[in-house]
């Protein structure tokens, strides 16, 4: 992947303050319906993004450190089974993907910037896997909450494919958000609470360090 191309496409977005305010109204103006277990914030100044990029422990650890991200919840969506348990999803029979639902302040970080972080956080050219995590539950997917998010996701996916930013075609799924089911409590804030475990040390930590270098100007203090 050519990182320079990626950033020219996604992070060099010239938006005036007035345009940003208009975009914020459009994004927050549409009511997002998320049934069952939900992490959608009641703070009207917050918007919601939902991404699947392999193991949700990795995704959570990366997005948590971005300035403007208020909270990240690990869970499941995209399948047919109601209130699935983690073990069910791991079997690959529920249709659900492991995802992170992100509550963010659009005055501090834009959806465009979150998309840039999403593309950088994993390999979107791998179908139904990330590294040694294999199965449809680990698919690369963007679940949009409104038409503007859908438009931006499709636009950048097309531009990245056209530019050759990745050596292979992007296989990321772009779908409307459905019911979101929050994962068990022990999955939440996983990396911060289990940093000494081998998976955290050898899989998550290197991803987080790489992510920090790329987005050093967008990290929380």
Image: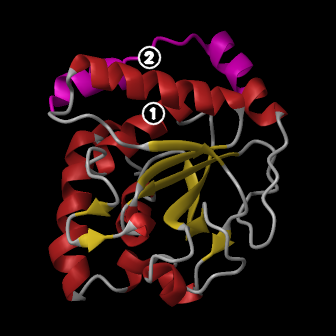
Q: Is residue 92 left or right of residue 34?
A: left
Figure label count? 2
Q: Quadrant of the N terminus?
A: top left
Stretch in magenta? 1-24
Give the percent coordinates (x, y) of residue 153.
51, 31
Q: Is residue 63 above or below residue 60?
A: above
What's the mark number on residue 201? none
Mark 2–mark 1 contact, CB under 8 Å?
Answer: yes
| Residue 139 lies within the magenta run | no
Residue at 60% across, 60% down: 78
| Quadrant hosting residue 213 | top left
| Residue 16 lies within the magenta run | yes
Q: Mark 2 highlights which residue?
A: 13
Neighbor class of circle 2 (other Cα within 10 Å; few <14, some 14-19, many 20+) is few
Residue at 73% across, 17% down: 22
Mark 2 → mark 1, Cα distance in angstroms: 9 Å
Residue at 29% across, 52% down: 122
Give the percent coordinates (x, y) of residue 104.
61, 47
Q: Is residue 70 above or below residue 4?
A: below
Q: Is residue 8 left or right of residue 77?
A: left
Please indicate, yes or no, whether residue 11 appears anywhere in the rendered image.
Answer: no
What's the mark number on residue 113? 1
First in sequence, mark 2 or 1: give its number.
2
Q: Nearer the viewer, residue 164 or 12?
A: 164
Q: Secondary structure at mark 2?
A: loop
Q: Secondary structure at mark 1?
A: helix
Q: Is residue 48 left or right of residue 44?
A: left
Q: Nearer the viewer, residue 35 or 70?
A: 35
Predominant SS of the magenta segment? helix
Give the percent coordinates (x, y) of residue 35.
81, 64
């Amino acid at each position: 992947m050519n990182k320079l191309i990626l950033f020219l496409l996604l992070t060099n977005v010239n938006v005036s303050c007035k345009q940003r305010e208009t975009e914020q109204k459009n994004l927050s103006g549409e009511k997002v319906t998320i049934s069952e277990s939900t992490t959608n914030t009641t703070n009207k100044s917050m918007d919601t993004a939902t991404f699947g990029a392999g193991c949700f422990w990795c995704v959570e650890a990366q997005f948590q450190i971005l300035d403007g991200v208020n909270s990240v919840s690990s869970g499941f969506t995209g399948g047919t089974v109601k209130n699935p348990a983690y073990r069910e999803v791991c079997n690959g029979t529920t249709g659900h993907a492991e995802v992170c639902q992100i509550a963010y302040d659009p005055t501090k970080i834009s959806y465009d910037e979150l998309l840039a972080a999403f593309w950088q956080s994993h390999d979107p050219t791998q179908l139904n896997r990330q590294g040694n995590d294999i199965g449809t539950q680990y698919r690369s997917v963007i679940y949009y909450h409104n038409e503007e998010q859908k438009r931006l996701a499709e636009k950048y996916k097309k531009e990245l494919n056209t530019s050759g930013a990745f050596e292979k075609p992007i296989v990321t799924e772009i779908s409307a958000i459905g019911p979101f089911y929050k994962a068990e409590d022990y999955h939440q804030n996983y990396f911060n609470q289990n940093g000494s475990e081998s998976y955290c040390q050898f899989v998550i930590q290197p991803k987080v360090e790489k992510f920090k270098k790329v987005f050093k100007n967008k990290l929380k203090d």
